[in-house]
Image: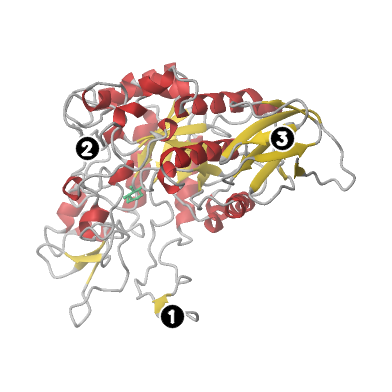
Amino acid sequence: MPQPWWRSAVFYQVYVRSFADSDDDGIGDLPGITSHLEHVRDLGADAIWITPFYPSPQKDHGYDVSDYFEVNPEYGTLDDFDGLLERAHELRLKVLVDIVPNHTSDQHDWFRAAVSAPDNSFRERYHFADPKPDGAPPNNWTSSFGGPAWSPEPAGKQWYLHLFAPEQPDLNWWNPAVPKEFERILEFWLDRSADGFRIDVAAALFKRRDLEDRPFLIDPITGLPKFDSDFAIVDQPQLHDVYRRWRQIANGYEPARVLVGEIFDPRRHAKYIVPDQLHMAFALIHQRWDAGLWRRSIENSRRALQGPGAGPTWTLANHDVVRPVTRLGGGSLGRCRARAALLLLLGLPGQVFLYQGEELGLEEADMPDSARQDPIFLRTEGRLKGRDGCRVPLPWRRGRPNAGFSNANPWLPMPAGWDQFAVEAQAGAGDSTLAHFRRALAARRRLWNRLPERVDWLHTPDGVLAYARGPLVVACNFLSRPARLRLQGRLEAASEPLVAEKTGILHLPPNSAAWLLRVARPRQADGREALTSA
Ligand code: NOJ
């Protein structure tokens, strides 16, 4: 049976504000995306996910939506959206829209109505509650952006719930008007030819109904009080009916549309990634550079999703986490490791999500505090730096103002020399990170239908990981010294740089990985293969 298009697809995440600016206001926009889609096609991706482009006061850069049926005028118009879809489809790229169902902006019509009068019926669409008798918030839940998850409403006597910023009031999914509205929103974008959705904070929509305080426990090791992590605020069983309904909607289109949940914890994946609910959720690998930790993390995600029709969705980066090059050591060391990590994950069964700039080897950018805009930075009074560093606009051209992103100053400043990473500068250089990504994605595409689902880990010396998928062997050296390894069978290099000799001896430089194709496969007496030091 042919696989659906999304199975094993490579998705490329476009952070709209920072991708490409077509009208020189320093802010990326939809026409900017349309005119740079060839970059994504040339990279070898199958689809893009665009972060929220709806009208929004931008208190959380688009994740505070004030109108789900329009385009933020800073980013363009609905016609621009249609034009983007048309061009993407001409280039055989699918397009996922980001849907934000957990909360709206406090400037959304519903919330404005809700706070306009104490008896307004729209209050039922959010969570309003009385403060405690001593004036404290209704319960002790905390916001992911720091501080309590409740704020007093501007004029009334009650408080409202926000798991993120106060400008992002949480919707009350127990009220049937809320799920009904989101079905309308889904259909609106699907009817405009969107190929699916990335669902923001996908496990959180229903909050526990009693809004009880989260109990404290005494940590047996430190003796200090801590929140009871088994006390579920979110992940309520009613959510599954919502996703069943969404799946029916997605299946009503031809070809069926796809639903990607923003859920990272592998222990929760199996509940949502089932044939009548979501298609995928993220397997974000963010361990430090250590062979054992990476193997464990990969295995946890693989074990979480057993059975046909579902596989992990490998991810190293997105707009919320420190860029992998920086996480993995920074500079050329971090870049080598990030390249190796790509090869390690690309060979595994499942989907892959790349984040814009990963293919250029961008690092987390530093900037003066006065330039920072992330609510995490602002709400923690600078204690946490926040996510601006991974959101700095893309460099497109060398020697151009603002590296070709815009003729105006970009909304976040670019570090000096940012243009050395420009797409144009890397495109012609065989040893560039961009060239590495293109080669790796092309190799994956070439080999893919020859590879079984099954993954066999090979016995390796400490600090090296290797697995076989049928004829493909992927080996990754986490060490800071070269590894010289012997694998039985005759090998060909399937990826650049060439590190194999036909002798079967594999030279892996420090912090590098390689793909090898086995021409002849040996049988070991005990059925277990080894990649031994040579
Ligand atoms: C997850 C998004 O990726 C992040 O950027 C946002 O701040 C939160 N959800 C809240 O919407």
Residue 195 visible (yes or no): no
Left or right: where does residue 182 sit relative to residue 220?
Answer: left
Its colouring scheme is: secondary structure
What distance separates the C-alpha of mark 1 from that of mark 3? 46 Å
Residue 115 visible (yes or no): yes
Q: Check disc 2: other Cα within 10 Å, few if <14, some if 14-19, many if 20+.
A: some
Name the residue tied to disc 2. 413
Camera-near label (3 vs 2) is 2
Instruction: Tell me: residue 372, above or below residue 421.
Output: below
Camera-near label (2 vs 1) is 2
Callout 2, which amino acid? Pro
User: Under 8 Å from ligand 1: the CB of mark 2?
Assistant: no
Q: Secondary structure at mark 3?
A: loop
Left or right: where does residue 490 sit relative to residue 356?
Answer: right
Residue drawn at the location 19% of the way across and 82% of the way down: 134
Callout 1, which amino acid? Leu
Name the residue tied to disc 3. 452
Front position in the image: 159 or 403? 403
**Count of all numbered marks drawn on residues in the image:** 3
**Reading the chain from its start, which is encountered first: label 1 or label 3?**
1
**Reading the chain from its start, which is encountered first: label 3 or label 2?**
2
